[in-house]
Image (cartoon, helix red, strand yellow):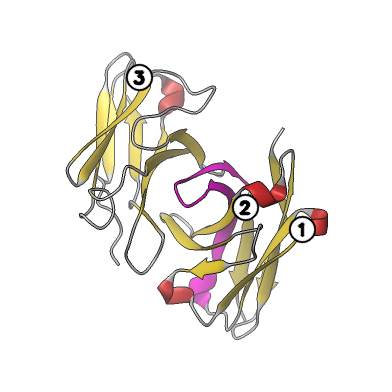
Amino acid sequence: QSALTQPASVSGSPGQSITISCTGTSSDVGGYNYVSWYQQHPGKAPKLIIYDVNNRPSGISDRFSGSKSGNTASLTISALRAEDEADYYCNSYTSGNTLAIFGGGTKLTVL
Amino acid sequence: QVLLVQSGAEVKEPGASVKVSCKTSGYIFTNYYLHWVRQAPGQGLEWVGRIRPDTGVTYYAQRFQGRVSMTMDTSISTAYMELSRLTSGDTVVYYCARGLYDRYFDFWGQGTLVTVSS
């Protein structure tokens, strides 16, 4: 089962907004509202920032938001800050030969 | 607070097995699933499998079936992942992560680097 499709990299300037897409199939992203997003800084463990498509865990800034349309989920980060520079991964529950599938990851560069 | 603390780095020879532990605290161990995710150097995340601490039922990603075993000791709130017949492709960081069922992973361990080398 192939990974969910994310752009390899995105960039933006401080204060701007960026959106990262995550494309799957009707067996994963399109079939369930169980899409989550993780932020990972170099050498650190991933950190949950969005769950169930558009919910933020306690303590996560409202600059992070999620959405979904059909087989594509999206993560939007508004008012970019230098500390947002990290790798971002989407994940979805799946009815395939694995219960959970990740995207390939997107490297966010804050210019 | 919720903590997941993993065992230390390991170096193994090809063909050997490795067992990584994940000691949890700060929550009721049997109330949440425990997932294992791995990451090769410079690569993305890959889901390996999970165990339900309330029943011991496991589910493994197809490509690891027959080679991975997940167990637990509820008396010490600790989960284990053992991977056998190691190859150089298993040189990765293994993470344990607490899961709300199979929906998402809200707390993660610090990671355990397993290096497979002769």
Q: Amino acid at mark 1?
A: Thr
Which sits in the foreground, A14 or A37? A37
- The reply to whether the magenta stretch includes residue A34 is no
Question: Disc 3 sits on a residue from what chain?
Answer: A
Marks 3 and 2 share the same chain: no
Task: Look at the numbered disc 3 and give the secondary structure of its residue.
Answer: loop
In which quadrant is the C terminus of chain A drawn? top left
**Observer-nearest residue: A11 or B53?**
B53
- Residue A80 — which label? 3
On screen, A82 above or below B110? above
Q: Do the residues at discs 3 and 1 belong to one chain?
A: no
A68 relative position to B117: left or right = left
Residue at 34%, 34% in the rendered image:
A108
Q: Residue at x 35, y 47 (%)?
A: A105
- Name the amino acid, label 2: Gly
Residue where numbered disc 1 is placed: B74
The residue segment tinted magenta is: B88-109
Labels 2 and 1: the sequence-earlier one: 1
Displayed quadrant of residue A77: top left
* Label ID, residue B111: 2
Do the residues indicated by labels 2 and 1 lie within the same chain of the protein? yes
Q: Secondary structure at mark 2?
A: loop
Tag 1, which secondary structure? helix
* Amino acid marked by disc 3: Leu
Do the residues under discs 3 and 2 have CB atoms within 8 angstroms? no
Q: How crowded is the residue under tag 1: few (<14 C-alpha within 10 Å), some, or many (20+)?
A: some
Mark 2 vs mark 1, foreground winner is 1
Real-space CA distance between mark 2 and mark 1, rounded to the nearest whole angstrom: 21 Å
Residue B28's x, y, as percent? 72, 44
